[in-house]
Image: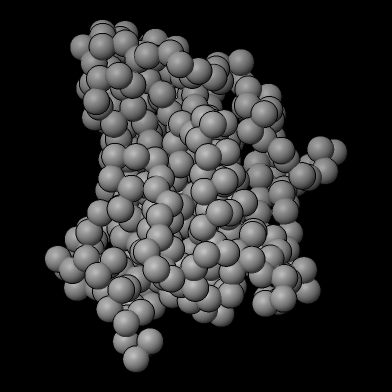
Amino acid sequence: MFRIQTILEMENLLLQGSKTKDLVAAGKTKSKAPGTKLTAQQVRHEVSIFARVLVNVYCGWPFHKKILKRKILKKLIDIYNNAHAMTSLELINQLKPVIEIIPDNHINLSISGHGVRAKTGLRKLRPNVGSNVAGNNKFVVKFQKDIGVIGVRTLIDWTEEDKQTFEQQWRDLLPKVKILIIDLRNNSGGGSLPIDLLCRYILGARYPIARKMYIRNNPDANAVKNFYKPLNVAVFDPQSDKDPAIYKYISKKSIPKFDETKAGFNGPIYVLINGDVMSAAEIVCTNMQFHPKAKLVGTNTCGGEVYGNNYAYILFPHSNMIFNVGCVYRELFVKNFELNGYNPDIKCPDGTDAMNVALADIKKQKH
């Protein structure tokens, strides 16, 4: 009688072809060309490393359903057992179906520098509700009469000068206006610090971005943490044997109540969103949920916040492909968030500019 393998047995089969020392930080290494030839042994080695990152480093693995894990592991075992000489492009094409069924907008495998990437196939199409007012700039801060506009198109590659200029401009703007529009459209995230400071000032307090946060805690995950210490301020008991371990826990009592006497801005706030808004940009939406006069305008955000802190960029030794996974799992205040995102308070039809819709609502409220 055929016995069905347990998930643990399937994991162990795949992990036998690699070791913790095989987990190497990608840094700025460029992948080898897609046509790079790999031997059968090299293919098995890279598939095993892929599995090791997925099973022991990736924050989402303990939280995904068993049926999904079985599908993933079965696909990987098929590739592993039937490994043969192939190119890097052929290998990533075999691994694509594994990535595509994972409901995570962050996870990706790439032949870096050659435009070849595998990511979730579950991302949803969103209506067109206009583009960010910042255009090709990282940000723009401007006002007309009593309406202030802060457009933040990206949070990637900000210099210290960018951060200082942005903060100086919004601090100068906010006391001069009665209504605020924050344009996040097309902002796929990056480093959240510039907007964290803005949100904290507007709300007058620091609000949590999740109810609970978990981090992986095992030899593989802890080895990867050592690559990225500046980005990994892990608040958990290093002696704990739990995996995943509680990274941060927020009780209801620790969520501050909005206090308009401490808030930096008490007027109406319109946050413009679309389907490209995710990750650090969605943190702004999370924060603005605590402001009683804030409205989200546009269409659903992308939904890429549950599996966060993507500092694990692992380099495959033979193809130099890069496998990037989130390292912190967040139990958000909103259910079914990943892939769905935030629902707008004012929904815009396809082809409608969210800025015009917000301005029309402002005019309506004034009258």
Residue 149 place in picture, x, y as percent: 40, 60
Residue 272 place in picture, x, y as percent: 36, 64
Q: Is residue 222 above or below residue 246?
A: above
User: Does residue 44 appear left or right of residue 325 in this picture?
Assistant: left
One can see residue 326 in this view: no
Q: How is the image coloured?
A: one colour
Query: Quick one: which residue is furthest to the right in this view?
Result: 239
Residue 36 place in picture, x, y as percent: 26, 9
Q: Is residue 15 above or below residue 207?
A: above
Q: Nearer the viewer, residue 204 or 100?
A: 204
Q: Quadrant of the C terminus?
A: bottom left
Q: How many marks?
A: 0
Residue in the image at 29% along x and 31% along y? 117
Q: Nearer the viewer, residue 359 or 112?
A: 359
Residue in the image at 55% along x and 54% along y? 172
Residue 227: quarter of image: top right
Residue 183: quarter of image: bottom left
Q: Is residue 105 above or below residue 300?
A: above
Residue 177 place in picture, x, y as percent: 49, 68
Residue in the image at 25% along x and 27% along y? 116
Query: Quick one: which residue is furthest to the left in this view?
Result: 351
